Image: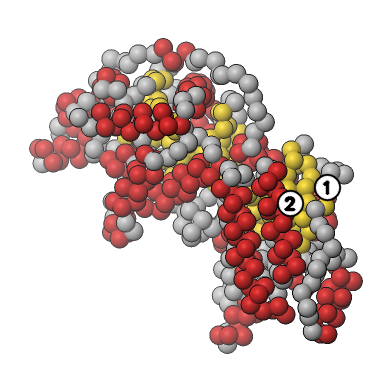
């Protein structure tokens, strides 16, 4: 293990820690076990005595900081939290009830996987659990997962890996094949440090590592964004809604956008959002620092955020994994029925052998297609630099906001100069000629809303982020006010018109 493992809590202890005091109500009926051998019957009896429960999972509902949630919690002391047919039926019943009653679902597995005493029928029950969760998520309801020590086998390969957001206990052993089984099959121990919560986080398979004590606050923040309490009214019209384009030359904007002190997406989330929970990675073994994925709330408006993260000194620009992470954000917005906010600030996608072999061009195309077909409202922000396909990939949206000194170009001006003049000396001239500045983008109908930079963004970054946040809240509201079919048609027509 790479971190000290917290004391293993029983299912009842975890429920008392996470839910508001006295609010848990069980949904469980007496477990009906399938016909069993005398030895298995004895195992079940011993498990009941050891755990104080009648099966390896407890289900029910309670309040989490006042918000109603459904819960499924493993009891590891009952046959190592293994899932047989009775436990599977209990899980699927709980998932379906949560779906039918329209409430978020929290799963806290700790399990060795399928119950070996029941063989193939128990193994196949994972399909039914997955189907129930798919229906829950398809209803636009949040499904959150907290992986506990240990979670392996069929549980990890089904309901443990389907969360909209997934967190894990520090030091927890998490993986598909348990280390004891691996050693028995391969004659050598499993490599140390691989099947740990921290390593899964490093590889973008989970969104964070959190102690059980920190879990209530973290879940409350997530649910406060993805399942907010209804609010009436529209946000106030920001001052920037009446702003007109500035008169600075395009090259001036390019220089302003490249200032090291210019705020970035991290600054926007920290200073402009009411709350934000950063998620991590693609969920498929990749985590690229070139892009940030987050759940955020700007004023009264919740959204999924996908945005370029300006590299720190020595860092890389966005690569193919960044765009796969972006497409995870698109899917989250679609499933949770939240608006999508994209933030564009890139000097260009990564240029390397790894990027080419990783399918960068195809990922740009697939991200573009996903944004164009997105069924929920969307807003795009031209924050600063906007070079090449990496910028274009995050652009299609119902409403487009631009900072005064943002820009959008097929290549950085130096690259365009190299093509046109075989040097970089004409970059400023080409930037002005190619109409990459916000005034030009506003004139052709791409930009809907301009956020002035007065004082300059790098001089008062906090004020700039607050102004941008107000514009985001306003434009999210405007996009959401349009009926779905009308909004989708307008989005298609907008970009069709811009192409002529």
Q: Secondary structure at mark 1?
A: loop
Q: How many marks?
A: 2
Give the CA separation, mark 1 to mark 2.
9 Å
Task: Tell me what residue is drawn at x 25 percent, y 28 percent.
Answer: 497
**Rendered residue at 67%/73% (across/down):** 122
Asked if 86 appears above or below 491 in the picture, the reply is below
Q: Position of residue 421 (x, y in %)?
A: 9, 37
Q: Are marks 1 and 2 in contact (CB under 8 Å)?
A: yes
Whether residue 263 is visible: no
Q: In the displayed image of the protein, which residue is found farthest to the bottom?
A: 187
Report x, y in % for residue 174.
62, 65
* Quadrant of the drawing holding the C terminus: top left
Q: Which residue is mark 1?
A: 24
Instruction: Say above or below: 381 vs 25.
Output: above
Position of 276 relative to 298 (above/below): below
| Depth check, front residue: 184 or 316 | 184
Q: Position of residue 422 (x, y in %)?
A: 10, 41
Secondary structure type for disc 2: strand
Q: Residue 315's spot in the image, x, y percent?
A: 40, 48
Determine which residue is flagged by label 2: 71
Q: Quadrant of residue 486?
A: top left
């Amino acid at each position: 293990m790479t971190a000290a493992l917290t004391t293993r809590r029983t299912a009842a202890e975890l429920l008392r820690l996470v839910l508001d005091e006295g609010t848990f109500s069980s949904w469980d009926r007496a477990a009906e076990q399938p016909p069993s051998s005398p030895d298995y019957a004895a195992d079940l009896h011993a498990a009941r005595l050891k755990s104080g429960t009648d099966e390896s999972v407890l289900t029910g509902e309670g309040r989490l900081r006042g918000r109603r949630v459904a819960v499924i919690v493993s009891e590891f002391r009952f046959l190592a939290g293994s899932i047989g047919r009775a436990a599977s039926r209990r899980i699927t019943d709980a998932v379906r009830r949560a779906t039918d009653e329209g409430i978020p679902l929290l799963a806290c597995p700790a399990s060795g996987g399928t119950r070996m005493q029941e063989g193939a029928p128990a193994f196949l029950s994972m399909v039914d659990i997955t189907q129930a969760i798919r229906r829950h998520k398809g209803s636009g309801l949040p499904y959150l997962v907290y992986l506990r020590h240990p979670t392996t086998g069929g549980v990890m390969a089904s309901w443990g890996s389907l969360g909209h957001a997934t967190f894990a206990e520090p030091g927890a052993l998490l993986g598909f094949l348990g280390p004891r089984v691996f050693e028995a099959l391969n004659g050598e121990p499993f490599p140390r440090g691989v099947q740990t919560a921290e390593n899964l986080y490093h590889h973008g398979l989970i969104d964070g590592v959190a102690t059980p004590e920190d879990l209530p606050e973290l879940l409350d923040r997530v649910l406060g964004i993805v399942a907010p309490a209804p609010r009436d009214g529209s946000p106030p019209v920001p001052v920037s809604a009446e702003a007109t384009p500035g008169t600075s030359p395009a090259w001036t904007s390019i220089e302003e956008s490249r200032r090291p002190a210019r705020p970035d997406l991290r600054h926007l989330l920290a200073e402009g959002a009411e709350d934000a929970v950063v998620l991590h990675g693609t969920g498929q073994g990749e985590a690229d620092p070139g892009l940030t994925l987050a759940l955020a709330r700007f004023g009264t408006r919740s959204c999924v955020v996908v945005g370029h993260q300006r590299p720190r000194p020595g860092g890389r620009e966005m690569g193919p994994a960044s765009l796969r992470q972006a497409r995870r954000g698109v899917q989250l917005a679609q499933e949770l029925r939240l608006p999508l906010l994209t933030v564009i600030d890139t000097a260009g996608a990564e240029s390397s052998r790894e990027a080419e072999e990783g399918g960068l061009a195809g990922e740009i195309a697939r991200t573009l297609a996903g944004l164009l077909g997105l069924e929920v409202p969307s807003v795009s922000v031209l924050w600063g630099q906007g070079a090449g396909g990496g910028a274009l990939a995050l652009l299609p949206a119902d409403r487009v906001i631009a900072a005064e000194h943002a820009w959008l170009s097929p290549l950085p001006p130096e690259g365009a100069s190299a093509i046109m003049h075989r040097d970089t000396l004409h970059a400023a001239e080409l930037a002005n000629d190619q109409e990459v500045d916000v005034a030009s983008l506003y004139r052709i109908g791409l930009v809907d809303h301009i956020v002035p930079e007065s004082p300059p963004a790098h001089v008062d970054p906090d004020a700039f982020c607050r102004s941008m946040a107000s514009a985001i809240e306003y434009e999210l509201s405007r996009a959401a006010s349009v009926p779905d079919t009308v909004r989708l048609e307008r989005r298609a027509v907008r970009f069709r018109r811009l192409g002529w």
